[in-house]
Amino acid sequence: MATQVRANYYYHHRSNVMAAAATTLTSSSPSTCLNSISPLLFKGSSFIGNKKIALGRSIGFERTTSLRRKKGKEYGGVVVVASSSNVAAPPWDSWKPEKSSSAPSLSDILWPSAGAFAAMAILGKMDQVLAPKGISMTIAPLGAVCAVLFASPSTPAARKYNMFMAQIGCAAMGVMSFSIFGPGWLARSTALAASIAFMIYTRSTHPPAASLPIMFIDGVKLHHLNFWYAFFPGAAGCVILSLIQEVVCYLKDNIKF
């Protein structure tokens, strides 16, 4: 009789515990349920060492964990998100022409070319006037300046500050290097290095100006100009080219075909 009473008491006590566990599962979070009711469910059983795993299987956690492990193995456990700005371009990409939305129109080709023709024609006429004095306005760096001003007027190298600052500064570097080291490789190397450092420091990068110091060191006809070479013919020629650039830009913007 006592045994039957104890059995009935154990049966009703266990039923109440299971009912409380089910109520807790439906009203609480999975982690709370697992920590709070697992000692009651598995106390005294042979599965006490695996009580959380068994309860997890009973409420469906084992499937989720296995899926997560499967995904972790499939994708290496790491998800890498790369933006387009961090993706390195192929090494051969710089050998291809720049991608643009559309091909340049005929007017975009004609007006810069006409501006370069007019610039060299005007400088050539000025050479005829200055020929008796042994001075020439048509120098190679001004041809590179024409390409910058007429073909790519929106680039930093085409800014007036960059152009005049670099033309004057680099020409002066050539004169100083020639005065210190005389003609030769040391003067050319020093002048070019100083010119690049000057353009970087003053934030006036203008590639055509880097040839001015070398031209002065190797050009015997320019030595008599001394420090006047900083203003003539480079900076003086850029004044004329700047005026022609304004005309070319106006024609490109207003007369298209």
Image: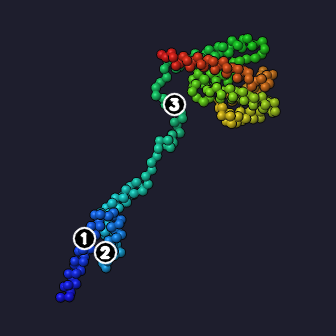
Q: Which residue is mark 1?
A: 19
State the image coordinates of residue 123 (x, y, percent, origin top left).
Answer: 68, 15
Judge from the rendering whether residue 166 lies leftward or rightward of residue 105; answer left or right. right
Q: Which residue is mark 2?
A: 40
Residue for point 64% across, 26% down:
160
| Structural distance between the alpha carbons of marks 2 and 3 | 72 Å
Upstream in the sequence, badge 1 or badge 2? 1
Mark 1 packing: few (<14 Cα in 10 Å), some, or many (20+)?
Answer: few
Rendered-image quadrant of the N terminus: bottom left
Q: In the image, which disc is placed on residue 162?
A: none
Q: Quadrant of residue 202 in the image? A: top right
Q: In the image, which disc is placed on residue 98?
A: 3
| Structural distance between the alpha carbons of marks 3 and 1 | 73 Å
Tell me if residue 66 can be seen: no
Query: What amino acid is labelled 2 in the image?
Result: Leu
Residue for point 75% across, 13% down:
131
Query: What amino acid is labelled 3 in the image?
Result: Glu
Q: Which of the two residues, 2 or 168, is positioned nearer the viewer here?
A: 2
Q: Secondary structure at mark 1?
A: helix
